[in-house]
Image: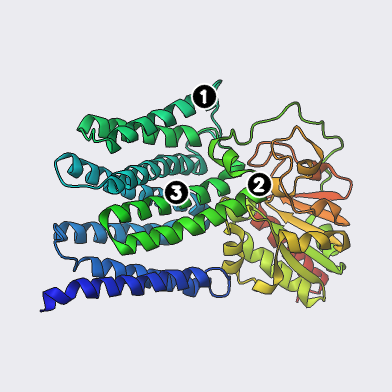
């Protein structure tokens, strides 16, 4: 009797897991409840995983348990050891593993169908589509990881690249169509996956580093869709629901990121990201340095200060010192706000996570649309590590690869102080006109050291307190 009741219990567990997934995702939409949302969604995944062990006809349970144990151990160790600055490439890598798993499931099912197991046309179509998307997400995410890790050039282009990419994609579709038509030989399956993996690589190679937030969210959506399609093939409700939730969330996030980068989704998928449109306009003027003590005085006697963090802050691990400096300003009566661009850093929400880690209250953090109207009334804008998201050429230079991208209007503040290690360009590889503006001063040095100097100068101004 218990054996007859098990399928119902498993399906009920999957329903509970689905509720936890959706509620967890809802809670993740707010910084105040995001941590709890992650716990809820994790609990849902645990319930779904445990329930799967009791599905009728499950085989190789010891191997499955061993694989879960090894994966959990690897994730635990990497999660503890990976620095926050390396979190974007970690997310890309883990997302790729999800797409690769979906592709592997598709490969296994296609080979089983080829060996004589009955399959409907719908199962074949969804299995092929899921495998294609999963393979593209896997290989594309690995290239994104390599770029973020600095193991390969940020952009790789050649003449006729789009045409070659289109041919590879069409060849993958043709191989997939052959599989759906019943040609389930091993050779056709191998050719299909080789072409799908190649397309994922070639689609990601020309993408510039400044567009990585879009890429990561896009492949996240791909992985979710692949899992959902393979869930239909396996008739597994948990995979279907989890995949659809991830796919929908990833798609919405991709649209948000693409809008923030002034990209269409078609351009995200098949465009040549970051390509120059012509000869860039010359930037006149010179970068004007400032000492930390002078910068601290300027902000100490300001009425409004906006702090704009970027990836450089993450690299320097300067968020704690910056928040200490902001607290000192607030104690002096200065109105301080943190301005966040949607694609600041290397992945969506990167700066929000860093600031939360430092203890910055959520009500002091403003997004781009809210803070931009306030910049003209801001006495000092302190930029630390941000580059392309504050570059005025996005509004003034039609030949710039970032032209049309919405930016933080830092240049309209009365005074701008930029903490920067040197005079190099940003991740997009272009000069920043903000650094040469008349109202901008450059505080050169490591972000954490510069922030510490600002703190010391402000304390000295207050008599050491």
Local crowd at mark 2 within 10 Å, few (<14), some, or many (≥20)? many
Mark before the other along the chain sequence, 3 or 2 = 3
Q: Is residue 130 above or below residue 341?
A: above
Secondary element under disc 1, as helix, strand or loop, is: helix
Sequence-wise first label, 1 or 2: 1
C-beta proximity under 8 Å, tags 3 and 2: no
Q: Nearer the viewer, residue 289 or 153?
A: 153
Q: CA distance from mark 3 to mark 2?
A: 19 Å
Q: Which one is closest to the eye, mark 1 or mark 2?
A: 1
The image's mark for residue 338 is: none
Residue 435, percent from left and from top: 79, 44
Return the mark for residue 163.
1
Between the residue at mark 1 and the residue at mark 3, the CA separation in whole angstroms equals 22 Å
Q: In which quadrant is the C terminus drawn?
A: bottom right
Q: Position of residue 69 (x, y in %)?
A: 25, 61
- The answer, for residue 290, to whether it is visible in the render is no
At x 81%, y 75%, the residue is 332
């Amino acid at each position: 009797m218990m054996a007859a009741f098990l399928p119902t219990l498993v399906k009920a567990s999957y329903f509970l897991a689905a509720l936890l997934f959706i509620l967890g995702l809802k809670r993740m939409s707010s910084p105040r409840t995001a941590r709890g949302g992650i716990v809820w969604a994790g609990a849902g995944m645990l319930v779904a995983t445990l329930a799967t062990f009791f599905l009728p006809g499950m085989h190789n349970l010891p191997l499955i348990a061993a694989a879960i144990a090894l994966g959990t151990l690897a994730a635990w160790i990497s999660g503890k050891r990976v620095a926050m600055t390396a979190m974007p490439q970690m997310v890309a890598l883990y997302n790729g593993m999800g797409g690769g798993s979906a592709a592997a499931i598709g490969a296994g099912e296609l080979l089983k169908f080829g060996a004589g197991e009955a399959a409907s046309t719908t199962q074949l179509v969804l299995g092929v589509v899921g495998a294609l998307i999963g393979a593209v997400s896997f290989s594309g995410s690995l290239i994104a990881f390599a770029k973020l890790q600095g193991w390969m050039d940020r952009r790789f282009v050649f003449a006729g690249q789009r045409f070659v990419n289109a041919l590879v994609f069409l060849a993958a579709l043709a191989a997939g169509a052959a599989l759906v038509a019943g040609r389930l030989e091993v050779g056709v399956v191998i050719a299909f996956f080789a072409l799908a993996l190649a397309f994922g690589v070639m689609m990601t190679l020309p993408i510039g580093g400044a567009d990585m937030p879009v890429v990561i969210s896009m492949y996240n959506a791909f992985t979710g869709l692949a899992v959902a399609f393979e869930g239909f093939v396996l008739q597994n409700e948990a995979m279907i629901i989890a995949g659809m939730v991830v796919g929908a969330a990833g798609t919405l996030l991709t649209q948000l990121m693409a809008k923030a980068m002034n990209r269409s989704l078609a351009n995200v998928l098949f465009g040549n990201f970051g390509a120059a449109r012509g000869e860039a306009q010359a930037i006149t003027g010179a970068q004007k340095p400032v000492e930390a003590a002078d910068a601290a005085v300027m902000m100490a006697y300001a009425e409004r200060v906006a702090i704009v963090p970027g990836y450089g802050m993450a690299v320097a691990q300067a968020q704690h010192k910056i928040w200490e400096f902001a607290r000192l300003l607030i104690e002096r009566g200065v109105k301080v706000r943190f301005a966040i661009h949607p694609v600041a850093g290397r992945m969506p929400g990167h700066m929000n996570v860093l600031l939360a880690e430092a203890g910055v209250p959520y009500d002091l953090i403003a997004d781009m649309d809210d803070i931009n109207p306030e910049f003209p009334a801001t006495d000092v804008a302190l930029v630390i590590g941000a580059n392309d998201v504050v570059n005025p050429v996005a509004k003034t230079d039609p030949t710039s690869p970032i032209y049309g991208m919405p930016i933080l209007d830092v240049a309209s503040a009365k005074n701008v102080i930029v903490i920067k290690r040197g005079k190099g360009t940003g991740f997009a590889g272009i000069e920043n006109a903000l650094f040469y503006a008349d109202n901008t001063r450059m505080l050169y040095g490591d972000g954490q050291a510069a922030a510490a100097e600002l703190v010391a100068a402000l304390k000295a101004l207050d008599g050491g307190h």
